[in-house]
Image (spheres, helix red, strand yellow):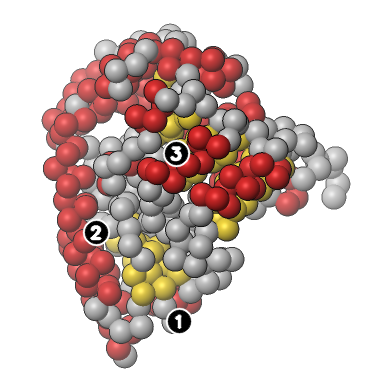
């Protein structure tokens, strides 16, 4: 190489997605709906009065207070991130580093491993069982053996859709000393959280995002709940003004009006169930149980099926050649019409 890059960068896989004008965009676990009209109107109204010439509120106190109130905690227990992605990276920067281990499941959100690498930490992946369940004993053992400084859990898990029972989370948290972050990006489609365990365990951290259930992927806002010491330490690795004012205002309105999203979330859950039944009825397709807004399927013809769907301008996430996910495809639950179109296309291909 011509330039003297930081060692290790050559090993980092860029996060790549197939960018296309899909007719049905079911590849990124986004919400199929833009903001509800009432919320959209309020956001636009707020933006109209924004002081574009001023830096945003550095403490982000309004949004943090809203979130703190919802969880009956204090603003000092809430940290906002540029997406929960920034929170996860910041946690790796805070607890990881050279010679320090970070334990996380595989297959799961691929960025965990990337953030561990980026922070020069030792990545310690724990492989899920055949049915994609997580063995809590394996996590504790890996953490002990590697003297882990941070454990990341993903519940429900992306891209498998599977869950970790609360007892298993407590099994892990009660047996380790290092911080454990539960990435609850899909919490709203599952309805169960580890947040109540925070009263009992100071080293438990919850990460959430507005990108999925609240349809704010464009805005990049996530948050973390943790004890005040952890929040103040993680805050040190953040840039000042890391959330722009447009995102802050939008997130505030959306969080305030979050009840408006309940019908949409309910519909996605219903559609997920309907889609799972329809897909399972197609020959040679295995449907994994999901508590999220996506469904993982497995078929021997996954590679060809992916190509076929792409041809039909239906975007899905192809994992068919990914380690531990051979022949798997992840499908985001879309609108009823999109789901019907998808099912029809898959049926056509599988029975041709
Ligand atoms: C989508 C996702 C995130 C990140 O979402 P942001 O848009 O960065 O808030 C984090 N974790 C998991 C498991 C995800 O699927």
Whichever of callouts 3 and 2 sits on the residue coming sooner in the sequence is 3
Of the image marks 1 and 3, the number of the one nearer the N terminus: 3
Image location (x, y in percent) of residue 46: 25, 18
Mark toward the start of the polypeptide (1 vs 2): 2
> Which percent across, then down, holds residue 128?
52, 59
Q: Is residue 102 above or below residue 94?
A: below
Residue denoted by label 1: 300
Location of residue 7 (image quadrant): top right
Residue behind mark 3: 170
Residue drawn at x 37%, y 12% as measured from the top left? 74
Tell me how far mark 3 sits from mark 2, CA to CA.
Answer: 28 Å
Image location (x, y in percent) of residue 40: 20, 31
Would residue 284 appear left or right of 124 to someone viewing this image?
A: left
Of marks 3 and 2, the one in the foreground: 3
Apparent side of residue 121 relative to residue 49 in the rendered image (left or right)? right
**What secondary structure is found at the residue carrying circle 1?**
loop
Q: Which residue is the site of mark 2? A: 272
Judging depth in this view, the residue of 307 and 47 nearest the camera is 307
């Amino acid at each position: 190489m011509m330039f003297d890059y930081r060692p290790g960068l050559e090993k980092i896989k860029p996060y790549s997605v197939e960018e296309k004008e899909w007719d049905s965009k079911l590849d990124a676990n986004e919400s199929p709906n833009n903001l509800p009209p009432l919320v959209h109107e309020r956001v636009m109204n707020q933006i109209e009065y924004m002081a574009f010439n001023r830096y945003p509120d550095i403490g982000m106190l309004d949004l943090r207070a809203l979130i703190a109130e919802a969880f009956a905690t204090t603003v000092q227990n809430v940290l906002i991130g540029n997406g929960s992605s920034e929170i996860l990276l910041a946690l790796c920067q805070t607890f990881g580093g050279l010679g320090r281990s970070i334990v996380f499941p595989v297959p799961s959100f691929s960025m965990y491993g990337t953030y561990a690498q980026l922070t020069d930490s030792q990545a310690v992946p724990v492989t899920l069982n055949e049915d994609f369940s997580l063995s809590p004993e394996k996590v504790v053992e890996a953490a002990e053996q590697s003297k882990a400084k941070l454990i990341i859990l993903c519940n429900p898990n992306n891209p498998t859709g599977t869950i970790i029972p609360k007892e298993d989370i407590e099994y892990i948290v009660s047996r380790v000393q290092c911080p454990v972050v539960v990435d609850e990006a899909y919490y709203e489609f599952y309805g169960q959280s580890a947040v109540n365990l925070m009263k009992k365990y100071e080293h438990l951290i919850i990460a959430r995002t507005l990108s999925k259930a609240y349809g704010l992927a464009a805005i990049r806002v996530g948050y973390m709940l943790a004890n005040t010491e952890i929040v103040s330490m993680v805050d040190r690795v953040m840039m000042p003004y890391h959330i722009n004012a447009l995102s802050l205002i939008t997130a505030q309105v959306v969080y305030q009006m979050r009840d408006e999203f309940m019908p949409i979330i309910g519909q996605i859950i219903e559609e997920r169930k309907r889609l799972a039944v329809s897909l399972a009825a197609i020959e040679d397709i295995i449907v994994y149980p999901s508590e999220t807004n996506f469904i993982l399927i497995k078929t021997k013809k996954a590679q060809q099926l992916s190509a076929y769907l792409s041809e039909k301008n239906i975007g899905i996430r192809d994992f068919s050649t990914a380690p531990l996910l051979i022949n798997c495809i992840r499908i985001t639950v879309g609108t009823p019409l999109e789901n019907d179109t998808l099912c029809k296309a898959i049926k056509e291909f599988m029975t041709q």
